[in-house]
């Protein structure tokens, strides 16, 4: 089963192109399929931010990940929408993963704090010109893609898992992008089918192991580590373990991916 699934989604080619950062994104993506249930059980599910300069592979990565769960592109240029328009997008997303494109000066300024409820309660307030406002629940997950990390409040940053494809230590692709770019949706859907079927396994494992993982981060990085960041990192470590089990990912790549999460925790403790 593991080898068949790895072959179907061309995982080895994916890892050869994106390395540990790709594995981390895929682990988050596996959890995001069950984001509403995870928020119900754990009270939160982090946003994913993928940044990188032009040509770093952001589009290739997101196109690949969307094929895994049979999702057609569902994106929004945040800076080209009003707050009400953004709220309607989140409300109508269902359980889909919403990809938000941050386009800076090309659009209007964004108050990133308006996204904070999507992290925990998932509540979205829809305001209409006539009649009372309606509160609905966002059941999907949120990806933000940009050229540079967001300029936002610490409260928003603590809700984000950042993957920088242009970092100095980013993986150097060892294959051509076509090796994964031409993966068909029918081939990739094997992953989405498996992850959907294993919802109890994913969410049950988070329930069982999250306290221990969070405690490990708290003990290792001390009181300087934001409690929200500790929870995000604990969720990611658990999801990485589950993904590695699902796909029989080699130990060296497992360790490299886990290190990225510990880097997130460590950087959170450094005063700016």
Image (spheres, rainbow, N blue to C red):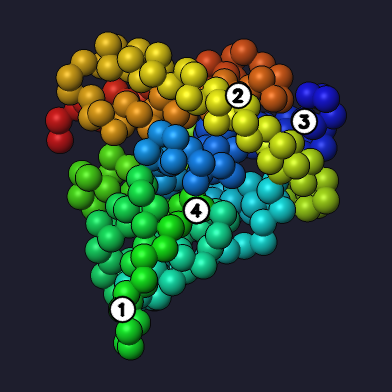
Label 2 or label 3, whichever lies nearer to me, is 2
- Residue 100 picture location, percent across and down: 45, 60
**C-alpha gap between disc 4 and disc 1:** 22 Å
Picture quarter containing residue 262?
top left
Q: Does residue 51 appear anywhere in the picture?
A: no
Identify which residue is drawn at 41% across, 24% down: 234
The residue pinned by badge 2 equals: 242
**C-alpha gap between disc 1 and disc 2:** 43 Å
Would you place residue 24 above or below residue 95 in this image? Answer: above
Quarter the C terminus occupies: top left
The residue pinned by badge 4 equals: 139
The residue pinned by badge 1 equals: 132
For disc 4, the neighbor class at 10 Å (few under 14, some 14 to 19, many from 20) is many
- Residue 227 picture location, percent across and down: 25, 28
Picture quarter containing residue 246?
top right
> Tag 1's secondary structure?
loop
The residue pinned by badge 3 equals: 6
- Residue 167 picture location, percent across and down: 42, 37
Q: Does residue 83 appear anywhere in the picture?
A: yes
């Amino acid at each position: 089963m593991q080898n068949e699934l790895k072959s179907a989604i061309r995982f080895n080619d994916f890892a050869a192109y994106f390395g540990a950062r790709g594995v981390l994104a895929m682990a988050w993506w596996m959890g995001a399929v069950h984001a509403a249930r995870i928020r119900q059980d754990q009270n939160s599910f982090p946003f994913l931010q993928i940044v990188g300069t032009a040509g770093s592979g952001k589009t290739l990565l997101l196109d690949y990940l969307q094929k895994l769960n049979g999702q057609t592109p569902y994106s929004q240029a945040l800076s080209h929408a009003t707050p009400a328009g953004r709220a309607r997008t989140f409300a109508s997303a269902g359980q889909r993963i919403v990809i938000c494109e941050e386009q800076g000066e090309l659009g209007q300024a964004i108050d990133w704090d308006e996204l904070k409820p999507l992290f925990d309660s998932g509540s979205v307030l829809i305001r209409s010109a006539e009649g009372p406002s309606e509160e609905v629940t966002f059941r999907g997950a949120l990806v933000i893609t940009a050229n540079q990390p967001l300029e936002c409040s610490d409260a928003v940053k603590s809700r984000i898992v950042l993957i920088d494809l242009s970092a100095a230590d980013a993986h150097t692709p060892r294959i051509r992008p076509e090796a994964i770019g031409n993966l068909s949706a029918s081939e990739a859907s094997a992953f989405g089918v498996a992850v959907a079927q294993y919802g109890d396994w994913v969410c049950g494992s988070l329930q069982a192991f999250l306290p221990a993982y969070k405690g490990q981060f708290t003990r290792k990085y001390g009181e300087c580590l934001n409690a929200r960041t500790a929870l995000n990192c604990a969720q990611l470590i658990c999801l990485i373990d589950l993904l590695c089990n699902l796909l029989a990912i080699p130990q060296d790549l497992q360790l490299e991916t886990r290190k990225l999460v510990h880097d997130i925790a460590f950087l959170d403790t450094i005063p700016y």
